[in-house]
Image (cartoon, helix red, strand yellow):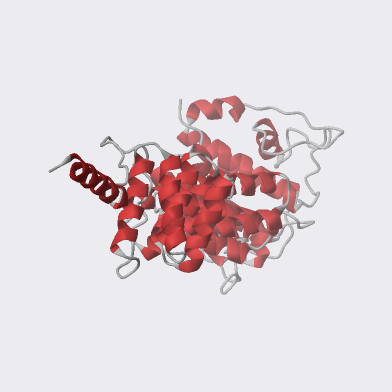
Amino acid sequence: MNRIGQALALMLVTLVSSCAPKTAAVPPVMPPKFPDFIFPAVPEGLGSTATLERHNLGWRWLQAGDPRAADRNFTAVLKESSGFYPAEAGLGYSALSRKDNKAAAEHFDRAVVANPRYAPALAGRGEALLALGDREMALKSFEAALVADPKLETLRSRVDVLRFRGLQDDVAEARKLADGGRLREAKTAYESAITASPQSPFLYRELAAIERREGDLTSALTHARKATELDPNDSRGLTLVGEIYETQNDFPKAVEAYSAAIAIEPSEALSNKIEDLRARAAFDAMPAEYRGIESSPNVTRAQLAALLGVRLDNFLKRSRDRNAVVITDTRGHWAATWILAVVRAGLMEVYANHTFQPQSAVRRGDLAQAASRVLSLIANENPRLGESWREAKRQFPDVSPGHLSYPAASLAVEAGVMKTLEDGSFDLSRPVTGAEAVAAVRTLEDLAERPRR
């Protein structure tokens, strides 16, 4: 070939080479810079082969740490095919990598508008919104992504963390509102927290406490019981149930709840409360005539017998002496059982005609006689205790040592069961008030239950 032919051949090769398609630059192979980013996968049937290749290349550049190169590829894809929304999601992730969260959210929004169930865009939008401080909307976007693609396990843990943090913030706000006395707002906050976490027992317990403060005991009890159903070992929940029942004067159920609480976590305070409630429950079960003793201006023989029989029940059961008696006027009487018990124990007497006369008024001399008989029984059981009052010789200006009632009056005063009047007199004939009778029998009960020394 001559020189002219060679030149023509060279020109032809150069021309062909310049017209051939250029090979796109590819990123170096390296570990991904953003492994937590969710690849904006392309749904089947969307885009040409060339579009898919350019889209994948954009993602490779992003993971190589070059967002600008990624943007060029994603933008080129959108110029060729404006409806190719995976590239919008790619631009969103590229913006996230640059911490341009506002721009990222806009790109993700456009992708979600094109496909509301596109999980990569929903997840990316959640990240952008979270970075922008909108935790609530971010959580909703993450949850929507999980609905669209339940296989996103890493996203599931993120949602759980967000829910927990959100719950913590909501509970903190609810407690702050409650401490400030804004109970209605606190209640609304707790209800919102329960909606977000319906299996959290402490939320129901704290809501119940708010409702109790508001006076809504029905709702309070419902939510407190729900807390104990979710966590049967929550002693605080059981205690709250007991407190609500106690407020409702349902003492047996209160005792049941308190007992369950101390079975989990022993408490001396609750044990004392249980004893008190049992006493109150027993008191409420008593006849009205008994319940009205303490406020009565004067006490009848039947009421005194009932007081002694109830308050000294354990002590009388320990006493072995039982007197055979006949009583003709107490059949069907509300205090018949206690009258029989104290008469058989020798604490009170029937009259010569076998009547007890339950409606007769009790005078201070009568109370002193009954008290002295109880004190004698106590001294027999606990001699060292009895020594402190057995030889008592109290002086009264109105009761001489030779009076038949003097020993009983002296013993009752010396043992602290009864008191003299302001001038030091005893006044045997003065009627006994209900409060005076209750105080005297309580003192006898305390002495009867003191340990032996």
Q: Among all residues in the image, which is located at the extreme right?
A: 423
Q: In front: 200, or 244?
A: 200
Q: Position of residue 303 (x, y in %)?
A: 66, 59
**Quadrant position of residue 215:** bottom right
**Quadrant position of residue 300:** bottom right
Q: Position of residue 261 (x, y in %)?
A: 44, 48
Q: Is residue 36 left or right of residue 323?
A: left
Q: Position of residue 333 (x, y in %)?
A: 60, 71
Which residue is drawn at the image coordinates 40% and 50% (left, top)? 73
Which residue is drawn at the image coordinates 56% and 55% (left, top)? 106
**One can see residue 428 in this view:** yes
Q: Is residue 208 left or right of residue 2?
A: right
Which residue is drawn at the image coordinates 73% and 51% (left, top)? 182
The number of discs equals: 0
Q: Position of residue 174 (x, y in %)?
A: 63, 49
Q: In front: 237, or 193?
A: 193
Q: In front: 7, or 69?
A: 7
**One can see residue 353 in this view:** no
Quarter of the image that includes the N terminus = top left
Q: Is residue 5 above or below residue 215?
A: above
Q: Is residue 39 left or right of residue 176?
A: left
Q: In front: 257, or 372?
A: 257
Q: Among all residues in the image, which is located at the extreme left?
A: 1
Q: Is residue 404 above or below residue 389?
A: below
